[in-house]
């Protein structure tokens, strides 16, 4: 597949991937900011508020009606966390008019709706509508509560938070529940205006389009005065070995969670990133991986046991669901898997299945325009843009020796357990 063609004006980067592979044209527009305690919560709330309506489409119903008139176009807004960056993300999918008997100018109309939502919100007395802000604050409390209800992801977040305490990475993607009530229509609007003026804006278009025409149209629509931020603060990837932290939380739960936070000291931009991906794959990313086979299948110690690599920060998160009285035994087996990895006890089958799994995942993602854009944005934020083809080629060149070499740098940092409340059975 061809590569993105990029144009830039005023800190607005337009990346166009002309392709006739898809029946839909996709637009993804993102604002990136550094994760900060004072802005994380309002920024997390912002895309959902903007998606409620705009000057031209003042209610969710009118906005949806406008999308329906574009032959079922769809639009969404969300907040992402990419390492130590918080990303306000809008996406629009609209049918390629070449496949329709009617529908001229569909792309321009879709872009008009998207830009209206992003740039021309409904205001009252120079600030956001109070009723919309209040409604979205209540919704945001529910979003944060939902994270706590999902005990697997909650344990991952808590482990990472304890592991990176004092670093921006410890700030949750959705911000803080106790900061929501502080948000006012005016304070939120002030955050929004700073975002428009200073944040790097990356707009992706994937579809059967003309690059120059699309870029010119986007710059016309997003014609606003800007003073874009020059650069983000560097992310701390390298960490010294320190005494392993043991953290225990207690909630009213029926199944324990055992998580381990591991420093890799290897991140997205590193030449060793492909090797670390394979290392994590052999360790715990797949059903054939050591953690799954040994902790879950062979010893029946966990309902699930796997690992995840965050290439933006250089963290491997091991996470498992374990009976309370089996947590110590499960931890011992988890430690053993790291030891055998560092000793090079890796079978040809483990390497073959891992590399095939990674290659397949990357190829499958090429079938999703949003994933294609997201992969490119990850590279921009991490400081090294690669193509998927480059990554696939790199995976296929990784050897057992490469995996052992990067495994030597793995450092246990935080052991986090989520147990039931003291006094309950199994404590």
Image: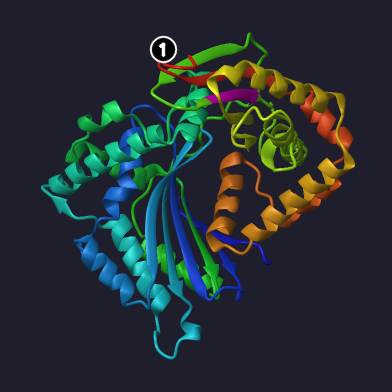
Expressed as whole percent of the image width and height from the top left, the position of residue 285 reads 68, 40
In this view, which residue lies farthest toward the left? 125
Q: Which residue is drawn at 34% across and 35% down?
A: 144
Is 270 covered by the magenta stretch?
Answer: no
Question: Crowdedness of circle 1 by 10 Å Cα count: few (<14), some, many (20+)?
Answer: few
Front in this rendered view, residue 272 or 8? 272
- Magenta residues, as a range? 257-262
Classify residue 87 by image quadrant: top left
Q: Quadrant for the N terminus, please.
A: bottom right
Q: Is the magenta stretch mostly helix, strand or loop?
A: strand
Expressed as whole percent of the image width and height from the top left, the position of residue 390 reads 75, 53
Q: Find numbered disc 1 in the image and state the secondary structure of the residue it sits on.
A: loop
Q: Which residue is drawn at 61% across and 72% down?
A: 19
Classify residue 319 by image quadrant: top right
Expressed as whole percent of the image width and height from the top left, the position of residue 201 reads 45, 50
Q: Can residue 411 be seen in this view?
A: yes
Front in this rendered view, residue 128 or 408? 408
Residue marked by disc 1: 422
Q: In this view, does 387 lie to the left or right of 64?
A: right
Q: Which residue is drawn at 67% across and 53% down?
A: 361
Front in this rendered view, residue 413 or 147? 147
Q: Can residue 126 be seen in this view?
A: no
In this view, which residue lies farthest toward the bottom? 101
Q: Which residue is drawn at 63% across and 26% down?
A: 237
In this view, which residue lies farthest toward the front? 425
Expressed as whole percent of the image width and height from the top left, the position of residue 169 reads 50, 28
State whether residue 154 is above or below residue 123: above
């Amino acid at each position: 597949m061809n590569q993105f063609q990029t144009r830039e004006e005023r800190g607005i980067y337009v990346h166009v991937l002309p392709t006739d592979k898809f029946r839909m044209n996709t637009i993804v527009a993102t604002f990136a900011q550094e994760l900060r305690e004072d802005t994380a919560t309002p920024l997390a709330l912002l895309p959902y508020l903007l998606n409620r309506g705009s000057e031209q489409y003042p209610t969710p119903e009118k906005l949806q009606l406008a999308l329906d008139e574009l032959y079922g176009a769809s639009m969404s807004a969300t907040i992402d966390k990419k390492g130590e960056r918080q990303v306000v993300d809008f996406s629009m999918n609209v049918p390629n008019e070449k496949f329709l008997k009617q529908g001229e100018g569909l792309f321009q109309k879709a872009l008009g709706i998207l830009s209206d939502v992003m740039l021309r919100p409904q205001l009252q007395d120079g600030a956001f509508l109070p009723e919309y802000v209040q409604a979205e604050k209540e919704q945001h409390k529910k979003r944060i509560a939902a994270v706590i209800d999902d005990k697997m992801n909650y344990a991952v977040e808590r482990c990472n938070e304890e592991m990176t305490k004092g670093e921006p990475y410890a700030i949750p993607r959705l911000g803080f529940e106790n900061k929501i009530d502080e948000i006012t229509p005016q304070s939120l609007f002030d955050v929004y205006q700073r975002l428009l003026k200073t944040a790097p804006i990356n707009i992706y278009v994937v579809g059967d389009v003309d690059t120059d025409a699309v870029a010119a149209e986007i710059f016309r629509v997003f014609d606003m005065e800007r003073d874009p931020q020059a650069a983000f603060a560097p992310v701390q990837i390298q960490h010294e070995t320190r005494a392993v932290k043991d953290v225990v939380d207690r909630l009213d739960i029926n199944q324990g969670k055992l998580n381990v936070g591991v420093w890799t000291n290897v991140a997205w931009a590193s030449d060793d990133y492909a090797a670390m991906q394979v290392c994590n794959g052999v360790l715990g990313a797949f059903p054939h991986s050591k953690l799954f086979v040994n902790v879950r299948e062979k010893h029946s110690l966990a309902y699930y046991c796997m690992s995840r690599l965050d290439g933006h920060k250089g963290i491997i998160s091991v996470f498992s669901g374990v009976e309370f009285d089996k947590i110590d035994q499960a931890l011992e087996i988890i430690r053993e898997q790291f030891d055998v990895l560092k000793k090079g006890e890796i079978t040809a089958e483990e390497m073959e299945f891992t590399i095939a799994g990674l290659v397949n995942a990357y190829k499958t993602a090429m079938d999703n325009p949003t994933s294609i854009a997201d992969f490119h944005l990850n590279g921009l934020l991490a400081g090294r843009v690669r193509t998927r083809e480059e990554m696939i080629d790199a995976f296929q060149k990784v050897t057992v020796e490469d995996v052992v070499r990067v495994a030597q740098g793995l450092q246990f940092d935080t052991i986090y357990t989520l147990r039931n409340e003291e006094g309950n059975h199994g404590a």
